[in-house]
Image (tube, helix red, strand yellow):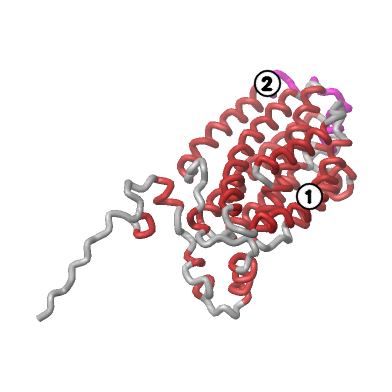
Amino acid sequence: MTDTPILKPLKTWSHLATRRRKPSEYEIVSTNLHYTTDNPDAPFELNRALPISQWFLKNRNASPLHHPDWNAFRDPDEMVYRTYNMLQDGAETYVAGLLGQFSARGHDAMLEAGWAATLARLYTPLRYLFHSLQMGSAYLVQIAPSSTISNCAVYQSADALRWLTHTAYRTRELAQSFPDLGFATGERQAWEEDPAWQGFRELVEKALTAYDWAESFTAFNLVARPAVEEAVLRGLGQSGRHNGDTLLGMLCDAQLADTQRHRRWSAALVQMALSQEGNREVLLGWIAKWEPLADGAIDAYCAALPDAPDAGSQASDAVRALRSSLDL
Protein backbone atom coordinates (compact mmCIF):
# COMPACT_ATOMS: atom_id res chain seq x y z
CA MET A 1 0.00 0.00 0.00
CA THR A 2 1.47 3.32 -1.04
CA ASP A 3 1.29 6.43 1.06
CA THR A 4 -0.98 9.13 -0.35
CA PRO A 5 0.73 12.52 -0.25
CA ILE A 6 -1.05 15.08 1.84
CA LEU A 7 -1.36 18.43 0.14
CA LYS A 8 -0.69 21.41 2.38
CA PRO A 9 -3.60 23.83 2.03
CA LEU A 10 -2.83 27.33 0.77
CA LYS A 11 -3.43 30.20 3.13
CA THR A 12 -4.76 32.39 0.33
CA TRP A 13 -5.56 32.32 -3.41
CA SER A 14 -2.86 30.70 -5.48
CA HIS A 15 -2.14 33.79 -7.57
CA LEU A 16 -1.48 35.75 -4.37
CA ALA A 17 0.38 33.03 -2.50
CA THR A 18 3.86 34.18 -3.55
CA ARG A 19 3.49 37.44 -1.63
CA ARG A 20 4.93 37.22 1.86
CA ARG A 21 2.07 39.09 3.49
CA LYS A 22 -1.66 38.97 3.92
CA PRO A 23 -3.41 40.12 0.70
CA SER A 24 -5.13 43.48 0.85
CA GLU A 25 -8.84 43.93 0.24
CA TYR A 26 -7.98 45.40 -3.16
CA GLU A 27 -5.92 42.37 -4.18
CA ILE A 28 -8.56 39.91 -3.03
CA VAL A 29 -11.52 41.46 -4.85
CA SER A 30 -9.80 42.96 -7.92
CA THR A 31 -7.15 40.63 -9.32
CA ASN A 32 -7.38 37.80 -11.86
CA LEU A 33 -11.14 38.00 -12.30
CA HIS A 34 -11.33 37.69 -16.11
CA TYR A 35 -12.15 34.08 -16.91
CA THR A 36 -12.08 35.02 -20.60
CA THR A 37 -8.28 35.24 -20.44
CA ASP A 38 -7.74 31.80 -18.89
CA ASN A 39 -7.35 30.21 -22.32
CA PRO A 40 -5.82 32.80 -24.67
CA ASP A 41 -6.73 30.71 -27.71
CA ALA A 42 -10.40 30.38 -26.77
CA PRO A 43 -11.94 33.46 -25.15
CA PHE A 44 -15.11 32.59 -23.21
CA GLU A 45 -14.01 28.94 -23.62
CA LEU A 46 -15.88 28.89 -26.93
CA ASN A 47 -14.91 27.80 -30.40
CA ARG A 48 -12.34 30.31 -31.67
CA ALA A 49 -14.19 30.49 -34.99
CA LEU A 50 -17.21 32.16 -33.39
CA PRO A 51 -17.54 35.92 -34.05
CA ILE A 52 -17.25 36.85 -30.37
CA SER A 53 -14.08 34.81 -30.03
CA GLN A 54 -12.62 36.38 -33.15
CA TRP A 55 -13.45 39.84 -31.80
CA PHE A 56 -11.50 39.27 -28.58
CA LEU A 57 -8.67 37.44 -30.31
CA LYS A 58 -8.20 40.41 -32.64
CA ASN A 59 -8.94 43.40 -30.43
CA ARG A 60 -7.52 42.16 -27.15
CA ASN A 61 -5.09 39.29 -27.65
CA ALA A 62 -3.53 40.58 -30.86
CA SER A 63 -3.16 44.20 -29.78
CA PRO A 64 0.21 45.67 -30.81
CA LEU A 65 0.56 47.01 -27.26
CA HIS A 66 2.00 44.00 -25.47
CA HIS A 67 2.99 42.90 -21.99
CA PRO A 68 3.66 39.39 -20.64
CA ASP A 69 1.38 39.89 -17.63
CA TRP A 70 -1.29 42.59 -17.77
CA ASN A 71 -2.72 41.09 -14.57
CA ALA A 72 0.22 42.63 -12.76
CA PHE A 73 -1.32 46.09 -13.25
CA ARG A 74 -2.45 47.78 -10.05
CA ASP A 75 -4.64 50.83 -9.57
CA PRO A 76 -2.53 53.41 -7.66
CA ASP A 77 -5.61 54.28 -5.58
CA GLU A 78 -6.48 50.60 -4.99
CA MET A 79 -10.13 51.51 -5.46
CA VAL A 80 -12.76 48.85 -4.81
CA TYR A 81 -16.54 49.04 -5.09
CA ARG A 82 -16.97 49.69 -1.38
CA THR A 83 -14.49 52.55 -1.21
CA TYR A 84 -15.69 54.03 -4.52
CA ASN A 85 -19.20 54.31 -3.11
CA MET A 86 -17.92 55.86 0.11
CA LEU A 87 -15.87 58.41 -1.83
CA GLN A 88 -18.54 59.37 -4.30
CA ASP A 89 -21.33 59.40 -1.74
CA GLY A 90 -19.46 62.30 -0.19
CA ALA A 91 -18.92 63.91 -3.59
CA GLU A 92 -22.61 63.66 -4.46
CA THR A 93 -23.57 65.08 -1.08
CA TYR A 94 -21.34 68.06 -1.87
CA VAL A 95 -22.89 68.54 -5.32
CA ALA A 96 -26.41 68.22 -3.92
CA GLY A 97 -25.51 70.88 -1.36
CA LEU A 98 -24.30 73.20 -4.09
CA LEU A 99 -27.47 72.75 -6.12
CA GLY A 100 -29.68 73.26 -3.09
CA GLN A 101 -27.93 76.36 -1.79
CA PHE A 102 -27.71 78.12 -5.14
CA SER A 103 -31.35 77.29 -5.89
CA ALA A 104 -32.45 78.66 -2.53
CA ARG A 105 -30.78 82.00 -3.22
CA GLY A 106 -32.39 82.33 -6.66
CA HIS A 107 -29.17 81.83 -8.61
CA ASP A 108 -30.71 81.31 -12.06
CA ALA A 109 -32.90 84.40 -11.79
CA MET A 110 -29.73 86.46 -11.41
CA LEU A 111 -28.11 85.15 -14.60
CA GLU A 112 -28.04 87.47 -17.59
CA ALA A 113 -30.09 86.33 -20.57
CA GLY A 114 -27.04 86.35 -22.82
CA TRP A 115 -25.16 83.98 -20.53
CA ALA A 116 -28.22 81.76 -20.24
CA ALA A 117 -28.25 81.48 -24.04
CA THR A 118 -24.57 80.50 -23.88
CA LEU A 119 -25.44 77.74 -21.42
CA ALA A 120 -28.07 76.42 -23.82
CA ARG A 121 -25.42 76.32 -26.53
CA LEU A 122 -22.22 75.27 -24.71
CA TYR A 123 -23.24 73.61 -21.45
CA THR A 124 -26.41 71.53 -21.53
CA PRO A 125 -25.45 69.67 -24.77
CA LEU A 126 -22.65 68.19 -22.65
CA ARG A 127 -25.02 65.30 -21.90
CA TYR A 128 -24.09 63.84 -25.30
CA LEU A 129 -20.37 64.28 -24.78
CA PHE A 130 -20.43 62.78 -21.28
CA HIS A 131 -22.44 59.82 -22.54
CA SER A 132 -19.82 59.23 -25.24
CA LEU A 133 -17.08 59.21 -22.60
CA GLN A 134 -19.13 56.77 -20.56
CA MET A 135 -19.54 54.43 -23.53
CA GLY A 136 -15.80 54.54 -24.23
CA SER A 137 -15.04 53.51 -20.65
CA ALA A 138 -17.73 50.82 -20.71
CA TYR A 139 -16.16 49.28 -23.82
CA LEU A 140 -12.78 49.17 -22.10
CA VAL A 141 -14.40 47.33 -19.18
CA GLN A 142 -15.36 44.52 -21.56
CA ILE A 143 -12.24 44.34 -23.72
CA ALA A 144 -9.36 45.07 -21.30
CA PRO A 145 -6.87 42.21 -20.77
CA SER A 146 -7.03 42.27 -16.97
CA SER A 147 -9.65 42.83 -14.31
CA THR A 148 -7.57 45.48 -12.56
CA ILE A 149 -7.72 47.59 -15.74
CA SER A 150 -11.43 46.86 -16.20
CA ASN A 151 -12.17 47.94 -12.62
CA CYS A 152 -10.56 51.35 -13.17
CA ALA A 153 -12.65 51.75 -16.32
CA VAL A 154 -15.83 50.79 -14.42
CA TYR A 155 -15.37 53.60 -11.92
CA GLN A 156 -14.45 56.00 -14.70
CA SER A 157 -17.63 55.05 -16.54
CA ALA A 158 -19.67 55.65 -13.39
CA ASP A 159 -18.10 59.09 -12.98
CA ALA A 160 -19.12 60.05 -16.52
CA LEU A 161 -22.71 59.06 -15.71
CA ARG A 162 -22.56 61.17 -12.55
CA TRP A 163 -21.43 64.16 -14.62
CA LEU A 164 -24.25 63.51 -17.07
CA THR A 165 -26.74 63.44 -14.20
CA HIS A 166 -25.49 66.77 -12.84
CA THR A 167 -25.87 68.31 -16.30
CA ALA A 168 -29.35 66.87 -16.77
CA TYR A 169 -30.45 68.27 -13.40
CA ARG A 170 -29.18 71.73 -14.29
CA THR A 171 -30.84 71.47 -17.70
CA ARG A 172 -34.23 71.06 -16.07
CA GLU A 173 -33.59 73.91 -13.62
CA LEU A 174 -32.54 76.24 -16.45
CA ALA A 175 -35.56 75.19 -18.52
CA GLN A 176 -37.82 76.35 -15.72
CA SER A 177 -36.07 79.73 -15.45
CA PHE A 178 -35.61 80.30 -19.19
CA PRO A 179 -38.44 78.45 -20.98
CA ASP A 180 -37.80 80.16 -24.34
CA LEU A 181 -34.11 79.27 -24.81
CA GLY A 182 -34.50 75.62 -25.82
CA PHE A 183 -33.26 74.00 -22.62
CA ALA A 184 -34.16 70.27 -22.56
CA THR A 185 -35.36 70.44 -26.17
CA GLY A 186 -32.55 71.91 -28.28
CA GLU A 187 -29.47 70.03 -27.10
CA ARG A 188 -29.48 67.37 -29.78
CA GLN A 189 -29.60 69.95 -32.54
CA ALA A 190 -26.76 71.88 -30.92
CA TRP A 191 -24.69 68.68 -30.57
CA GLU A 192 -25.24 67.69 -34.18
CA GLU A 193 -25.07 71.10 -35.88
CA ASP A 194 -23.42 73.82 -33.78
CA PRO A 195 -19.84 74.45 -35.01
CA ALA A 196 -18.61 74.65 -31.41
CA TRP A 197 -19.42 70.96 -30.85
CA GLN A 198 -18.49 69.39 -34.16
CA GLY A 199 -14.84 68.85 -33.26
CA PHE A 200 -15.67 66.97 -30.09
CA ARG A 201 -18.49 65.08 -31.79
CA GLU A 202 -16.15 63.86 -34.52
CA LEU A 203 -13.45 63.00 -31.99
CA VAL A 204 -15.57 60.88 -29.66
CA GLU A 205 -17.72 59.25 -32.33
CA LYS A 206 -14.61 58.11 -34.20
CA ALA A 207 -12.89 57.10 -30.96
CA LEU A 208 -15.81 54.78 -30.24
CA THR A 209 -14.74 52.83 -33.34
CA ALA A 210 -11.24 52.23 -31.97
CA TYR A 211 -11.89 48.60 -31.15
CA ASP A 212 -8.37 47.52 -30.19
CA TRP A 213 -8.43 47.74 -26.40
CA ALA A 214 -5.19 49.69 -26.12
CA GLU A 215 -6.04 52.10 -28.93
CA SER A 216 -9.41 52.73 -27.28
CA PHE A 217 -7.60 53.49 -24.02
CA THR A 218 -5.20 55.81 -25.86
CA ALA A 219 -7.88 57.60 -27.87
CA PHE A 220 -10.03 58.29 -24.83
CA ASN A 221 -7.76 58.46 -21.77
CA LEU A 222 -4.70 60.02 -23.35
CA VAL A 223 -6.34 62.25 -25.98
CA ALA A 224 -10.12 62.82 -25.82
CA ARG A 225 -10.64 62.94 -22.07
CA PRO A 226 -7.78 65.39 -21.38
CA ALA A 227 -9.12 67.61 -24.18
CA VAL A 228 -12.62 67.58 -22.64
CA GLU A 229 -11.28 68.17 -19.16
CA GLU A 230 -9.14 71.15 -20.09
CA ALA A 231 -11.30 72.80 -22.76
CA VAL A 232 -14.78 72.10 -21.44
CA LEU A 233 -14.62 71.49 -17.69
CA ARG A 234 -11.85 73.98 -16.98
CA GLY A 235 -12.51 76.47 -19.77
CA LEU A 236 -16.29 76.54 -19.37
CA GLY A 237 -15.97 76.74 -15.59
CA GLN A 238 -13.71 79.78 -15.85
CA SER A 239 -16.02 81.40 -18.38
CA GLY A 240 -18.93 80.78 -16.03
CA ARG A 241 -17.20 82.53 -13.15
CA HIS A 242 -16.45 85.51 -15.39
CA ASN A 243 -20.18 85.73 -16.15
CA GLY A 244 -21.53 85.46 -12.62
CA ASP A 245 -22.21 81.71 -12.79
CA THR A 246 -20.29 80.56 -9.73
CA LEU A 247 -22.42 77.42 -9.53
CA LEU A 248 -21.21 76.21 -12.93
CA GLY A 249 -17.61 76.86 -11.96
CA MET A 250 -17.97 74.85 -8.77
CA LEU A 251 -19.74 71.99 -10.55
CA CYS A 252 -16.92 71.82 -13.08
CA ASP A 253 -14.37 71.83 -10.26
CA ALA A 254 -16.16 68.90 -8.61
CA GLN A 255 -15.97 66.94 -11.86
CA LEU A 256 -12.31 67.86 -12.34
CA ALA A 257 -11.60 66.27 -8.95
CA ASP A 258 -12.63 62.90 -10.44
CA THR A 259 -10.27 63.37 -13.37
CA GLN A 260 -7.22 63.35 -11.09
CA ARG A 261 -7.96 59.76 -10.15
CA HIS A 262 -8.55 58.85 -13.82
CA ARG A 263 -5.20 60.36 -14.73
CA ARG A 264 -3.36 58.49 -11.98
CA TRP A 265 -4.44 55.05 -13.14
CA SER A 266 -3.92 55.98 -16.79
CA ALA A 267 -0.38 57.11 -16.00
CA ALA A 268 0.31 53.86 -14.13
CA LEU A 269 -0.89 51.81 -17.11
CA VAL A 270 1.23 53.84 -19.52
CA GLN A 271 4.32 53.36 -17.37
CA MET A 272 3.66 49.62 -17.24
CA ALA A 273 3.36 49.52 -21.02
CA LEU A 274 6.54 51.56 -21.52
CA SER A 275 8.52 48.91 -19.66
CA GLN A 276 8.23 46.75 -22.80
CA GLU A 277 10.28 47.47 -25.88
CA GLY A 278 8.30 48.77 -28.84
CA ASN A 279 5.28 49.97 -26.87
CA ARG A 280 6.36 53.62 -26.87
CA GLU A 281 6.24 53.70 -30.66
CA VAL A 282 2.79 52.09 -30.65
CA LEU A 283 1.40 54.65 -28.21
CA LEU A 284 3.00 57.58 -30.02
CA GLY A 285 1.54 56.35 -33.30
CA TRP A 286 -1.97 56.27 -31.86
CA ILE A 287 -1.55 59.68 -30.23
CA ALA A 288 -0.42 61.12 -33.56
CA LYS A 289 -3.55 59.65 -35.14
CA TRP A 290 -6.02 61.13 -32.62
CA GLU A 291 -4.29 64.33 -31.55
CA PRO A 292 -5.26 66.44 -34.61
CA LEU A 293 -8.95 65.74 -33.97
CA ALA A 294 -8.53 66.78 -30.33
CA ASP A 295 -6.69 69.95 -31.29
CA GLY A 296 -9.50 70.90 -33.67
CA ALA A 297 -12.11 70.13 -31.01
CA ILE A 298 -10.37 72.32 -28.44
CA ASP A 299 -10.03 75.22 -30.86
CA ALA A 300 -13.66 75.09 -32.04
CA TYR A 301 -15.14 74.86 -28.57
CA CYS A 302 -12.90 77.39 -26.85
CA ALA A 303 -13.40 79.92 -29.65
CA ALA A 304 -17.09 80.02 -28.67
CA LEU A 305 -16.47 80.61 -24.95
CA PRO A 306 -17.20 84.21 -23.91
CA ASP A 307 -14.65 86.09 -21.80
CA ALA A 308 -12.06 83.34 -22.17
CA PRO A 309 -9.70 84.55 -24.92
CA ASP A 310 -6.82 82.25 -23.95
CA ALA A 311 -8.87 79.15 -23.14
CA GLY A 312 -7.87 77.29 -26.31
CA SER A 313 -4.12 77.78 -25.98
CA GLN A 314 -4.22 77.05 -22.25
CA ALA A 315 -6.16 73.83 -22.82
CA SER A 316 -3.83 72.66 -25.59
CA ASP A 317 -0.74 73.44 -23.49
CA ALA A 318 -2.20 71.57 -20.50
CA VAL A 319 -2.99 68.50 -22.58
CA ARG A 320 0.50 68.38 -24.04
CA ALA A 321 2.05 68.89 -20.63
CA LEU A 322 0.06 65.94 -19.33
CA ARG A 323 1.34 63.62 -22.06
CA SER A 324 4.87 64.94 -21.62
CA SER A 325 4.67 64.00 -17.93
CA LEU A 326 3.99 60.44 -19.09
CA ASP A 327 7.16 60.43 -21.24
CA LEU A 328 5.03 60.47 -24.38
**Horizontal placement of 318 versus 82: left or right?**
right
Q: Residue furthest left?
A: 1
> Callout 1, which amino acid?
Glu
Residue 17, quarter of the rendered image: bottom left
Residue 166 in picture, x, y percent from top left = 67, 37
Residue 223 in picture, x, y percent from top left = 73, 48
Q: Residue furthest front?
A: 277
Front residue of this view, candidates 228 and 4: 4
SS at mark 1 in the image: helix
Q: Residues within 10 Å of mark 2 (few under 14, many from 20)?
A: few
Query: In the rendered image, which residue does mark 1 sit on?
Result: 291
Residue 11 in picture, x, y percent from top left = 27, 54
Q: Is the magenta stretch mostly helix, strand or loop?
A: helix
Q: Residue 47 carries which label?
A: none
Is 105 magenta? The answer is yes
Q: Look at 51% across and 52% down and name the residue there.
A: 73
**Horizontal placement of 328 versus 158: left or right?**
right
Front residue of this view, candidates 168 and 42: 42
Q: Is residue 63 above or below residue 242?
A: below
Q: Which residue lies furthest to the top in this view?
A: 105
Front residue of this view, candidates 257 and 226: 226
Residue 29 in picture, x, y percent from top left = 42, 51
Residue 214, quarter of the rendered image: bottom right
Q: Disc 1 or 2, which lies upstream in sequence?
A: 2
Q: In this view, does 320 lie above or below 105?
A: below
Q: Residues within 10 Å of mark 1 (few under 14, many from 20)?
A: some
Mark 1 vs mark 2: in front: 1
Q: How many labels does the image show?
A: 2
Q: Residue 104 carries which label?
A: 2
Q: Quadrant of the N terminus?
A: bottom left
Q: What stretch is highlighted in magenta?
A: 103-121
Q: Look at 71% across and 25% down and name the residue there.
A: 247
